[in-house]
Image: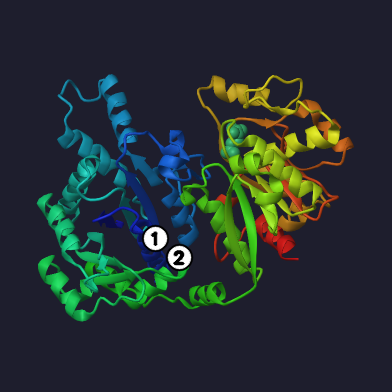
Amino acid sequence: MSKFIIVTGGVASSLGKGITAASLGRLLINRGFKVAVQKLDPYINVDPGTMSPYQHGEVFVTDDGTETDLDIGHYERFLNITCEKNCNFTSGKIYSSIIAKEREGKYLGKTIQFVPHVTNEIKEKIKSVENNNIDVVIVEIGGTVGDMEGLAFLEAVRQLRMELGQNNLLFLHCALLPYLEAAKEVKTKPAQNSVKELTRLGIQPDILVCRTNANIEVDNEMKQKLAMFCNLKGPEYVIQNSDAKCLYEVPLMLQSEGLDKIVCKQLKLKSKAANMTEWKKLVKKIIKPKKQITVGVIGKYIEVADAYISVTEALKHAGYNNDVDVKVKLISSVDIETYGTQQMLSNLSGIVVPGGFGTRGTEGKIMAANYARVNNIPYLGLCLGMQIAVIEFARNVIGWEDATSSEFDIKSKHYVIDIMDDQKSILEKGGTMRLGAYPCSLTPNTVSFKAYGKKKISERHRHRYEFNNKFRTNFEECGMVVAGVNEKRNLVEIVEIPKNKFYVAVQFHPEFKSHPDNPHPLFLEFINACKN
Ligand code: GLN
């Protein structure tokens, strides 16, 4: 049987609950345990797939094609695991499954109620992660304690604790300890109140993780006070989690606070201390001072840094392993349209055009791709960024001024990016996008082939439109090389311009598979080109 750790948050959102949970997972894995994760999001959308990045940040996609919360990305990066469809549930997904069962008559005429039907459904989803190979399941509940939407989830885990017992299910609550500048004091009252809110719902947390600013010490006296007021077994159940220089330092910080030790004690899990030697080497490499380069990421949701979190992380991972400090500059493609490339893009070592949807800002992205190609600045196109590279090439090299994608609302004779027949069949089957992992075969003697070092790869997708094969020879005759294809569906997956130092654009999302200790080969090659 698996043990469960339920992670909740209090006082404020953006406390780094996900990073805390992921760091704990890393520590448990390094103690030798098999760990699985799950994120429960209380909002009503069935999944974040339909939500604007402004609302929710990035949509992370798993191998099996599930569109998930961006915290799943943190879990994959920290734990080096591959998550599956049961890793993320929302209220919307829970309700739609209940309503489908109701329509099928599965409730045998009963009135369907919040308790037990909604809570049972949630418990079932949580237990769906459990299996004989998994020692610990970490379940993070999104939102903040006190949110109306979260009630069903909290009630479900309260019941689950009764069923499984305190040595099999543990409550870990993350709360903020604000620092008041004027009083020069750290305040514990908001954290105490958020624990009170939890206990009002029948949940007594076992461990309290306190988020603080850097340079602040939660000393033993304060831990004792918090333990006393929050009804914890002792000060060692209060863990400080202060702002770190880099995300990947957090597991080490939590280890020195004794988090994994106290978790194992409570859950009666026996093991040696976590061996973090390799992780320490990684962190040392990350924080070591080194030459800085600036890479521009040309997006349109740039006000929300989380909208491009996997891209930013993948660039940084490649930097750690290229011995350069990659500064990621998020640049608005709409501003490029207004102010021009010279003003917006000079002084960049490389240009990335990431994924995106809709027409707004696409002309600015095409201008950025043109600037990179003409000035021989390393260019990496990701999903929409590949489509943009193809359009730019068609307009300015092949000479089709009207070249565009049929996604954008423009009349044209040259839809070089279009819905392929193959995609029409996905749409007919009720799907909307090409989602999840697909195989790709690489062309020998290309940058991509050299980067991956093998012929067959698999990468994750999330898009509707494709390179239009009708025009493929026109591109090849003018110097664009098809470096990767999906053989079964005859789809172009990678294009390159060999004349340039580094000009690679891919129809998939390699950023989802980059890890700090195992950076993605395309990002590695891209940063290598940028640093020279
Ligand atoms: N909007 C494009 C498509 O649907 C690209 C999507 C993306 O970048 N993820 O094909």
x 58%, y 33%: residue: 360
Question: How far across and down, in percent of the image, does residue 281 sit?
Answer: 53, 77
Residue type (three-letter) at the residue carrying disc 1? Ile
- The local secondary structure at tag 1 comes to helix
Please report contact status of discs 1 and 2: CB closer than 8 Å, yes or no: yes
User: Where residue 247 is drawn, which disc sits there?
Assistant: 2
User: Where residue 266 is drawn, which disc sits there?
Assistant: none
Q: Point out the image quarter for the C terminus.
A: bottom right
Residue 166 sits above or below residue 83 on the image: below
Residue bearing mark 1: 19
Question: How far across and down, in percent of the image, does residue 397 sit?
Answer: 84, 37
242 with respect to 305 (left or right): left
x 40%, y 37%: residue: 47
Front-lying residue, 155 or 401: 401
Q: Point out the image quarter for the N terminus.
A: bottom left
x 45%, y 65%: residue: 247
Question: How far across and down, in percent of the image, does residue 179 sit?
Answer: 26, 68
Q: Quadrant of residue 398?
A: top right
x 55%, y 72%: residue: 286
For the residues labelled 1 and 2, the Cα–Cα distance comes to 8 Å
Front-lying residue, 39 or 180: 180
Q: Quadrant of residue 239?
A: bottom left
Label 1 Cα crowd, 10 Å radius (few <14 / some 14-19 / many 20+): some
Question: How far across and down, in percent of the image, does residue 2 sit?
Answer: 31, 57
Label 2 Cα crowd, 10 Å radius (few <14 / some 14-19 / many 20+): some
